[in-house]
Amino acid sequence: MKKAIRYLRFSDRKQSNGSIERQELYTGQWIKNNEVELVDTFIDRGYSAKTFDRPDFKKLQDFIAKHHKRVDYLIVDQLDRFSRNASEAMGYVKKLQQTYSIQIVSVTEGITFDYDTPGSFFRAGLQLLLAEEDNINRSIKVRGGIYTAKAKEGRYIYKNPPFGYYKIGERKERRLEINDTEASIVEFIFNSYLKDVPIYLIAEQAKERGFKRSGNVAVQRILSYPLYAGMQYVEPFKDYPGGLFPASHDPIIDLATWEQTQRKLRKPEKEKVVVSDEMPLRGVLKCSCGKPLTGAPSRGKLGRYYYYYKCNKTTHLNLSAVKAHDQLRQVFGLMSMPDKAIAVIRNGADQLFEKKMVDDKKLLEEKKKEFAAEEAKLFSIEEKWITNKITHDTYERWFSSINNNRISLKASIERLSGNQDKTYKILQKNLDKLSDLEFVYEKTNTLEKQELVRLGFEQNLYYQEGMYRTPTMIDLLSHNSQIMKEKGLLIYEKKRENFSIPPLSGLDGTRTRDPMRDRHVF
């Protein structure tokens, strides 16, 4: 008696009782009519027939390689259940017959593949080609539906919501709602990254706040996800362009913050700096050669550890952390502003704020007009493309340029439409702290100390010959610079105008100078 094995595949992981009963009926009838014994059955559930990369199909291959001498037939329900890739499937069934003398049987279609019989070969090939065509058509419909849902309707189409959101509704009614608890963590991640907090430290602190995503690049995924800015990326479809499109849900961060983050992510990754409470100036303070200082503890004779800042590029600097911290504490004490100066700032802030509000209002109206003009351009090129007045390549090129301008203008409008009064209140609330910067420096944590140093000296704080040195300092805080010099704490000398040095961009948008050239002024 001849023997057979059976292979079943379901695209859904859940069994369909009707499908199984039908297959059992046809298979049993074929086995009975042909007096064949069924040896074993292999079943894959929830796998596509596009390729043969399926677990039970691999077991089937192993079984055939070992026991092919006692197997005559491989039974499938339909050839498209076996595979939808016509070329791969034809090659495999041909191999089964020529190498292992096993024939493929499609019981519901009544086909027994026989490579030596032309009619059988043609029928099997036709069924596989029809199955592949059906698969292609289905793929086109799915991709078209995805493009329409995301690009034209702005819908979120995926099963699980991103971190920071709830998912409400199903299918076309599906939408995202902000999860306030998780959204605060997302905001923390973006704000920390733009303040130059190391990624590993952001991950640790986010986890303490309730960030549940794991993996080495979980934070980077959050930072690169456009959904948080109310946008989503769409793959191109046929002649329709891809790119970023507005989504229908509310954003967690503004578009300007997201764009700034993407620009920073695209820059070459800096050398990793480990943040340490014992050495808060590591990676912030620089050697006179321009290289950021590293640091490490040194063990004394009695077993006690002493911390030192060092330069990896040169060997001439070995700075005691105790000395460096005490000197900097005194520097911030002398940078503190007198009460009279703070009162002048407080009184002038009202006028400055009112003027800024008026200027921002004018600028907002200009940006809205520019945005409306870009929208009109976009409508115009779509109309020209539809009426065949321009080619698809021209349409894609113009669409990309106009869409980028729209996104940039939208970010500016969001920023200018924000709550400017909030900034003013923060300024008024914190002005008094300028009267005792030494206290502020001592009470802040390590990351805040680093930020204070970066801002106070515009990222240009150096150490040379027992003193701090800087070519840049906030003017309002430099009133005691002569006293700092006399006490041997810090030398503040502005860059001489006859030096031709390419400027660099600071964190706050100011123009700072090349640290490699700053040493010439000392």
Image: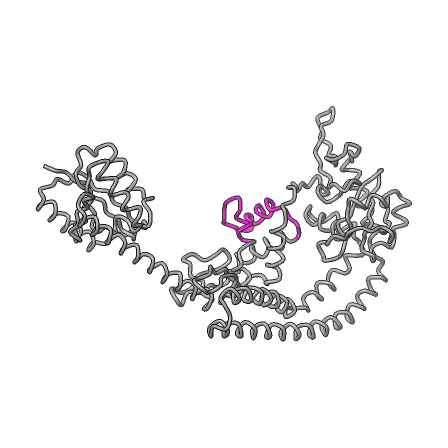
**Vertical relation: 169 (above or below) 278:** below
**Vertical relation: 248 (above or below) 76:** below
* x, y percent for residue 367: 64, 72
Residue drawn where x is 17% and y is 46% of the image: 117
**Vertical relation: 206 (above or below) 237:** above
Give the tally of numbered discs: 0
Q: Is residue 217 magenta?
A: yes
Front one among 311 and 35: 35
Q: Is residue 90 magenta?
A: no
* x, y percent for residue 83: 28, 49
* 136 relative to 493 in the view: left or right: left
Front one among 95 and 206: 95
* x, y percent for residue 72: 16, 38
Residue drawn where x is 31% and y is 46% of the image: 88
How does the figure colour the protein chain or chains?
Answer: one colour
Which residues lie in the magenta part?
Answer: 195-222
* x, y percent for residue 518: 81, 46
Q: Quadrant of residue 155?
A: bottom left
Front one among 322 and 138: 138
Residue drawn where x is 87% and y is 47% of the image: 484
Front one among 77 and 23: 77
Residue furthest to the top: 301
* 269 relative to 136 in the view: left or right: right
Q: Quadrant of residue 257?
A: bottom right
Look at the image and tell me in which quarter the C terminus lies. Answer: top right
**Vertical relation: 205 (above or below) 349:** above
* 414 relative to 42 in the view: left or right: right
* 476 relative to 226 in the view: left or right: right
Look at the image and tell me in which quarter the N terminus lies. Answer: top left
